[in-house]
Image (spheres, rainbow, N blue to C red):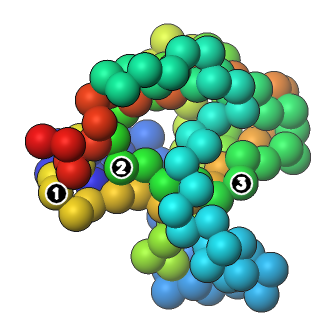
Amino acid sequence: MGTDSAAALSLVNTVVAEAFDRWSPPLHKEFETNTHRDQCGQTLLHDAPELRIWQTRLDPGERLPVHRHERDYVWIALTHGTARQHEGDGTSREISFERGRTQYFTFDEGQHHLHDLRNIGDEPLSFLTVETGGGAAAR
């Protein structure tokens, strides 16, 4: 992820494990299988070369499978909630969402973000993901 996004990410999450600690064999396999999966949400609302908009609603315990971000993007929280995210570098994080909060991520050439997301809260978690441009490769 770009330098701006790494600093901002620390404001909304807590690292709960590193070095693939407590990852199951099926989770490792899913990261291998989905390394290039670009479905960054549940429902694709808009799809154009310069803009893709995804809507996601996760019930408690529900999970968004491993996917890869290569385009710059912003997520917009539509509800409050808490999620656990496993990342391609072996880090696991818990992320707090506040309704209306947005977070922007940028990528330099060759960078990407590979992760999953599980709602670990007691209420549904909803957000939009808006991808812009064609990613670093298009610049």
In the image, 54 versus 62, the foreground residue is 54
Q: Which residue is mark 3?
A: 65
Q: Which residue is mark 1?
A: 109
What separation in Å lies between label 3 and label 1 (alpha carbons)?
A: 24 Å
In the image, 14 versus 92, the foreground residue is 92
Could you say where residue 127 lies in the image, as x and y percent from the top left?
Answer: 61, 23
The first of marks 3 and 2 along the sequence is 3
Amino acid type shown at disc 3: Pro
Query: Is residue 120 something one can see in this rendering?
Result: no
| Left/right of residue 112 with respect to residue 22 in the rendered view | left
What separation in Å lies between label 3 and label 2 (alpha carbons)?
A: 16 Å
Q: Say which mark, if any, is on residue 84.
A: none
> In the picture shown, does residue 97 fall above or below 63?
above
Could you say where residue 95 lies in the image, as x and y percent from the top left?
Answer: 55, 45
Q: Secondary structure at mark 2?
A: loop
Q: Crowding at label 2, few (<14), some or many (≥20) Cα neighbours within 10 Å?
A: many
What separation in Å lies between label 1 and label 2 (alpha carbons)?
A: 9 Å
Q: In this figure, what is the number of numbered marks?
A: 3
| Left/right of residue 24 with respect to residue 81 in the rendered view | right
Could you say where residue 20 lies in the image, as x and y percent from the top left?
Answer: 57, 84
Query: Is residue 112 something one can see in this rendering?
Result: yes
Report if the CB atoms under discs 3 and 2 are less than 8 Å apart.
no
Q: Which residue is mark 2?
A: 70
Q: Secondary structure at mark 1?
A: loop
Q: Crowding at label 1, few (<14), some or many (≥20) Cα neighbours within 10 Å?
A: few
Amino acid type shown at disc 2: Glu
The first of marks 3 and 1 along the sequence is 3
